[in-house]
Amino acid sequence: MTDITPLSPPAPFPATPVLPDWSSAGRPVRTVLTTHLWAAPPIERGAPAHDRAFAALRELGVDYARFLPWFSNPLVSVPALRAPTATTTSWDFTRLDPYVEDFIAAAEGRPVTANFATIPHWMFIGGENVDLGDDPDAIHWDYERGTVFRDQTLAEVADYFYRLASWYIAGGFHDEHGVWHESGHRYRFAYWEVLCEPDLNRQLSPEVYTRLYDAVVERLRPLDPEMRFIGLSLSHVHHNPEYFWYFLDPANHAPGIPLDAFSIHFYASPDIVNPFGPEGNPPASTWESTFFAQAEGFLEQVRMISSIARRLSPGTKMLLNEIGTYPSDIMNPAPDLPHEYWALSASFHTYLWARCLTLDIDLFGVAEFTGYPGMIPGVSLVDWETGEPNARYHATKLMVDHIHLGDRLVPTTTGAHGYPDARIHAQAIVGTDGRRRVVLVNKRDVPVNVEVGDCSERSTLYSVDASTPTGTPTAHAVRGGRLTLPAHASAVLVIE
């Protein structure tokens, strides 16, 4: 991005006007842009992608990155794989610790979020029948079997999370038989998220989830009085508004339980006819329209949920901490994604993030750092074989580098008066340093001519788009605000 090339003159057909109101007081940027990382086999120590992937996470430099060892790899994510007997326990952090240690190291002291989300299978009636084998890299989509807790008081679950948290926060814990397990860890987590997508496989009701949240928070609070908690973490397939009406009502919680934040997820995708291969699925030519149509529906849902939150618990932060896309073949063991997909996906999440800047959203998390074959590869920010960043990573970093908390959002229009150009999105921003910038997103797979009003003679367009196979950012000199926005561009125009 150090080489700046002149942008080719736009074609003679009309340019879409982008009109910022630089004189407006606007509103401050309050949305943290971040990502999350799975404990995924491609980035385990010794894997080819490990070093570059964790270096890329460090270089991204985001606050509140989220660590999520998910249920699909229980031999890594669950440090107590067997129920305690009268004399023994199965606590073993050997496989999980390296991921946590490398994640914390990559954060370099920045605040992070913990989500050790997986409840051991043996804590559910019928769950003890899951066959795990001994391959830590094996994917177990059926691990979350059983929906009824064997301990209806939920004390067993709360104690499990207390011991797990103590391992990383308090240097160790006493197990079920009073035996001390020393870790030496003294990490600090800004947030602890209670479960991940409890509405999905476990199908916990709002009432049961709220009781469990209270039990876990009550147990963990003494470990670090400054640690805050995130609730719900609902999947993108939930359709029950009662989760919000119930959980966000302080009257439904035990006295003194904090409602610091709640989170929801969203992934856009075409129809999934065949999750294991491309045969039978919608063609790539339809993905663009599908993704952005679903984005508009999600924004309406965000407004509704935000309204509920403001009514019931106005001090609770609203987090969108898993946002992404994937093609239909989400479990394809040999995915073949065109390089244009990554720029399309990047433009999708950049568009949603830019829209959320003007809503009451406290955090936007781009999902996710490492997907891989058989495990939703289309969500990845880096190449699962090499760890090299792709367009989704580069677009995220471009926005992290140029847009900061406290910058001022000013009203921005596109197109003719009363007829906004739906092909693009523009948001003008005045930095705390006084510099003017315009975030530009091209939602289409063809270039769009743009003319930014009240723009100086000299400016620079930094763009992540489909013009390069890896999505590497490019920089172009712009004269007088006239430019051609490349196909599926996630861009920032920096005005001199």
Image: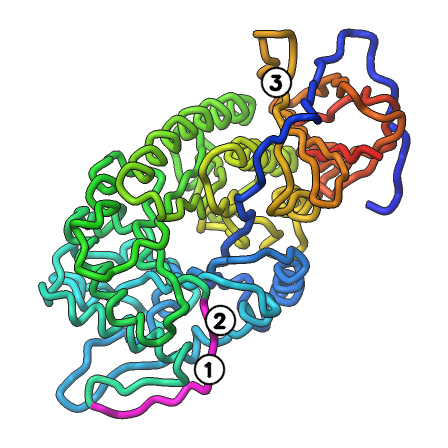
Rendered location of residue 349, percent (x, y): 55, 37
Q: Residue at x 54, y 53 (%)?
A: 369
**Mark 3 residue element:** loop
Counting residues from the start of the chain, the first of labels 1 and 2 encountered is 2
**Mark 2 residue element:** helix
**Mark 1 residue element:** loop
Q: Amino acid at mark 1?
A: His
Q: Gap in Å between the C-alphas at discs 1 and 2?
A: 10 Å
What mark, if any, has residue 185 been given in the picture?
1
Q: Gap in Å between the C-alphas at discs 3 and 1?
A: 50 Å
Q: Amino acid at mark 2?
A: Val
Q: Residue at x 20, y 53 (%)?
A: 210
Label 1 close to label 2 by CB (< 8 Å)? yes
Query: Which residue lies under the disc numbered 2?
Result: 100
Is 184 covered by the magenta stretch? yes
Counting residues from the start of the chain, the first of labels 3 and 2 encountered is 2
Q: Residue at x 39, y 89 (%)?
A: 182
Is 496 covered by the magenta stretch? no
Query: Which residue lies under the disc numbered 3?
Result: 423
Residue 234: image quadrant is top left
Q: Nearer the viewer, mark 1 or mark 2?
A: 1
Please state the extent of the stretch shown in magenta in the rendering. 178-189
Residue 171: image quadrant is bottom left
Q: Gap in Å between the C-alphas at discs 3 and 2?
A: 41 Å
The crowd level at tag 3 (other Cα within 10 Å; few <14, some 14-19, many 20+) is some
The crowd level at tag 2 (other Cα within 10 Å; few <14, some 14-19, many 20+) is some
Q: Residue at x 43, y 43 (%)?
A: 320
